[in-house]
Image (cartoon, rainbow, N blue to C red):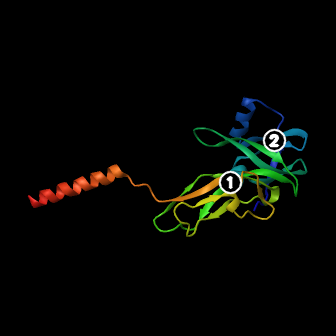
Amino acid sequence: MSNSVKIEALARTSFGKGASRQLRRDGRIPAVIYGHGVDPIHLSVDEHDIFLATKGVANALLTLSLEGEEHLALVKEIQRNPLSRNIEHVDLLRVAQGEKVDAEVPVEVVGESASGTIHTLEQQHLMLKVTATNIPESIAVDITGREEGAHITVANIAFPEGAECEMDPETIVVVIAAPEVDTALEAADAAAAEAASEAAAG
């Protein structure tokens, strides 16, 4: 579940590409916080702090300390350099304690399906309506013992208390199937075995 990470922020007064580049040279990342019908606030955060707060975390929740005030915010979008993958800008959505938000949560498959079967993940993420302070890190889908042909849909998944999935209940999330056999490879192996046998016999 989401626990907010406290980050010190500074207000931004200079804008444009040049100002943003200078911020990044100084080890800070430009960001904007918006929502709740109030004017957006342009700010900057420490590059290392925001990297740690968002590393491997979907829907990171932050408490921004800015000029003596605290703002609870959800990370909505991280813009990265296409080559270095360094963070270049962060979009933040202002939220309140107890407020429900839309959050895209990754699916995690747990357990092992029946012997001789494999699983295919049809939905990498599920869209949930959930309290901003209780967004799960992932949604576990248990496939233990599932036989070939089994389909796990949104309706089959037990979501955490207070979380609702607004997707069609019949949406298929995981499929259990037998692995496909590469007939061409099998034929090649058989031909090679036959040739080896003939060579040995001759």
Residue designated by label 1: 170
Q: Is residue 5 left or right of residue 88?
A: right
Q: Secondary structure at mark 1?
A: loop
Quadrant of image for the C terminus: bottom left
The residue wearing badge 2 is: 43
Q: Is residue 29 above or below residue 105?
A: above
Dot 2 falls on a residue whose secondary structure is: strand
Residue at (79, 60) in percent of width and height:
134
What is the number of callouts on the image?
2
Separation (CA) of disc 1 from disc 2: 43 Å
Q: Position of residue 61 (x, y in %)?
A: 78, 54
Frontmost residue, 97 versus 19: 97
43 sits left or right of 83 in the view:
right
Residue at image position (16%, 59%) is 197
Front one among 187 and 159:
187
- Expressed as whole percent of the image width and height from the top left, the position of residue 73 reads 82, 50
Using the rendered view, name the quadrant where residue 21 is placed: top right
Q: Which mark is residue 28?
A: none
Q: Amino acid at mark 1?
A: Glu
The nearer-to-camera label among 1 and 2 is: 1
**Residue at left offset 57%, top offset 57%:** 175
| 86 w.r.t. 189: above or below | above
Residue 98 in percent (x, y) is at 87, 58
Q: Nearer the viewer, residue 60 or 149?
A: 149
Which quadrant would the N terminus be assigned to in this image?
Answer: bottom right
Relative to 19, residue 160 above or below: below
Which of disc 2 and disc 1 is earlier in sequence? 2
Q: Residue at x 69, y 53 (%)?
A: 126
Which quadrant holds residue 158?
bottom right
Find residue 103 and report its horizontal and vertical position in percent: 75, 51
